[in-house]
Amino acid sequence: MKIKHWVQTLITAVLLHVALIAISILEVFIYSMTIVRGKTEEFYSKHAEVSGPWVSGIFGSLFIVLLVRRFIRQQHDGPLVYAIALPVMYTIIDLILIGMWMNDWTHFTFTTILVNGLKLGASLLSYLIFRRK
């Protein structure tokens, strides 16, 4: 990959975080307005802590599949490198953000490994499906 693709990959990983955080906020909003109404802010905050990683894992994997597919279809060099670099950069940013906002994130370890592993798997699967033969 060229340097500009590395920079684009980093920017994509940051924007993916922004999009997934927005989707998590939307999920909590919908949950609070339609499913469980009238609870305290603390209740919804705890719900966000539980649901956020799963929302991120599901939608993040889907978005990563689409992003790898797009990269391959644009005929860039190094699609396998991109398929590995995007989820790895995302995971590094994820760990930095978790470290900044959570004092004790040891109970998130399993979930973090699982959802970020899912994103890496989705990325590699996308590469295998859409690569040029």
Image (tube, rainbow, N blue to C red):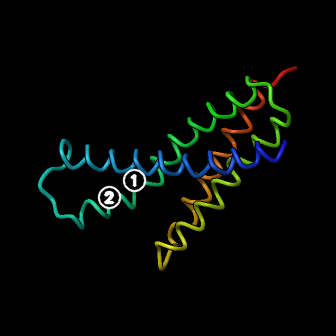
Residue named by callout 1: 51
Q: Nearer the viewer, residue 89 or 65?
A: 89
Disc 2 is placed on an element classified as helix
Looking at the rendered structure, which numbered label has been put on residue 11?
Answer: none
Q: Quadrant of residue 60?
A: top right
**Residue 127 sits above or below residue 43 on the image:** above
Amino acid under label 2? His
Amino acid under label 1? Ser
Residue 86: give x, y in percent of width and height. 69, 46
The residue positioned 53% from the left and 47% from the top of the image is 57
The residue positioned 20% from the left and 44% from the top of the image is 35
Task: Check the image and name the residue furthest to the left.
Answer: 38
The residue positioned 76% from the left and 32% from the top of the image is 127
Residue named by callout 2: 47
15 left or right of 68 in image: left
* Residues under numbered marks 2 and 1 in contact, where contact means CB atoms less than 8 Å apart: yes
Q: Nearer the viewer, residue 110 or 67?
A: 67
Residue 17: give x, y in percent of width and height. 53, 51
Disc 2 versus disc 1: distance between alpha carbons?
Answer: 6 Å
**Residue 133 sits above or below residue 114 on the image:** above
Mark 1 packing: few (<14 Cα in 10 Å), some, or many (20+)? Answer: some
Task: Check the image and name the residue furthest to the front.
Answer: 4
Q: Quadrant of the C terminus?
A: top right
Residue 20: give x, y in percent of width and height. 47, 47
The residue positioned 52% from the left and 66% from the top of the image is 108
15 left or right of 77 in image: left
